[in-house]
Image (spheres, helix red, strand yellow):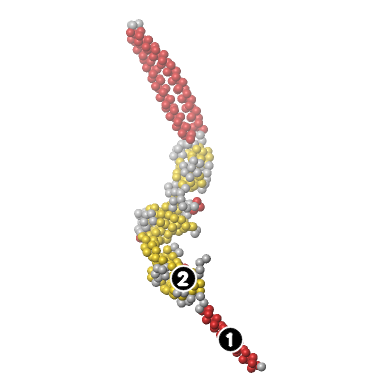
Amino acid sequence: MKYILSIILVIFFSISSSQAQYSKKNKGTRVTLVDVANVQNKNVEEKTTAIGRLVALNPIIVSSKISQEILKIHFKIGDEVKKNDVLFSLDSKNILRNIKRISAEIKYEEDTLNFLNKKLELRASKAKNAKSLRSQNIITQDTLDNVEITLIQNQQEISQRSYNIKKLRILLDENKENLSYTKILSPVNGNITDIKSQVGAVIAKGKVLASILEDEFYEIETDLRSDIASKVKIGSNVDIFNNKQKFSGKIRGIVNSENIRTGTRKIRISVGNSLPKNLTASGTRFSLEISVGNNLKRVLIPKDALTPMGERQFVYLYEKGLAKRTFVRTGISVGDNIEILNGLKEGEIVVIKGNENLRPNQPIKIKKKQ
């Protein structure tokens, strides 16, 4: 019986070992599903990366056009304002009193002028009669001269009153204009960045009261090494990134002066109105990809296709259902792609997903896209 049991155990272990070897052999040759991409030859701009910050373009200065006391400040630093919002209210009592006084003086001068015009009519008639009497030798020449002198004096008074009225009206218009200046309005839509006075202060004409950063009037400024900056072209494209958000800009200007200490030049990038309001604070930082030089033909593959091996890198090519390992030399980074300087050619198929555990000549199959 023991002999029979021993034979059965030997047969059992032999069968188990054969199945394990068969399973291991099949496991080594099973087909792996992969994602692939074509090797492409594209026109690509070389790019350089940099960090930039948002800078304001000429903040708007709000100043007083008259000398008066500040009665109220309607906004605070950091507030958003619209064009023609009232920013400051100034004391207007003295101006209103001046307007009333000048208006009364004008009324007095106008009434006086009316009386003088009536008097002129009478004196002109009297001078006419005097001339008639003088022609008849009824009155002397001295008497006629006195009448005419009185007429001239009347005309002179009328001229003086007319001048006074014009002068007073100019003064009245000036005070009415000053009255409008007691409400200091925002000249633009923007954000108040500074307030330089306080309630109760008596300000002089021309005193700067506030600074406003106008909406959409900003640029991004960055520093590039002079050798790189010299290759940048005005009007070339810039990709702008902040917290995974991407925006577009253009090179507006390159400052033609090198910082001797850092060996850099400043680059100014216009962004138009593409940035959302929450990213328009002065000093906001952005990651930049700036086009450098001309377009060049470059062989590109997705970065996911690369696998490191020490200091070298390789990819797996899809060839007749097998994974063929090929070592490559890489160049510049282009977004999610990488330039291949040698090792690949346009039209070849590289594995970009499922290549982590592949071995050379392992059977592979391309996944069907859903």
70 and 358: which one is in front? 358
Helix, strand or loop at label 1? It is helix
Q: Earlier in the sequence, mark 2 or mark 1?
A: 1
Rendered residue at 41%/68% (across/down): 347
Q: Quadrant where the N terminus lies?
A: bottom right
The spot of residue 5 in percent (x, y) is 64, 91
Rendered residue at 47%/23% (across/down): 107
255 and 365: which one is in front? 365
Residue 224 appears in the picture as rendered: yes
Residue 311 appears in the picture as rendered: no
84 and 179: which one is in front? 84
Count of numbered marks? 2
The spot of residue 216 in percent (x, y) is 46, 49
Rendered residue at 45%/22% (across/down): 110
Rendering quarter of residue 145: top left
Determine whether, in the image, residue 19 is placed left or right of residue 221.
right
Q: Is residue 224 above or below residue 139?
A: below
The spot of residue 367 in percent (x, y) is 50, 70
Rendering quarter of residue 334: bottom left
Q: Is residue 359 above or below residue 163?
A: below
| Disc marking residue 351 | 2
For the residues labelled 2 and 1, the Cα–Cα distance comes to 39 Å
Determine whether, in the image, residue 369 is placed left or right of residue 158.
right
Amino acid type assigned to the residue bearing label 2 in the image: Val
Q: Is residue 305 above or below residue 122?
A: below
The spot of residue 49 in percent (x, y) is 42, 61
Helix, strand or loop at label 2? It is strand
| Disc marking residue 15 | 1
- Residue neighbourhood size for the residue with mark 2, other residues' Cα within 10 Å, grouped as few (<14), some (14–19), many (≥20): many
Amino acid type assigned to the residue bearing label 1 in the image: Ile
Rendered residue at 47%/46% (across/down): 212
| Disc marking residue 150 | none
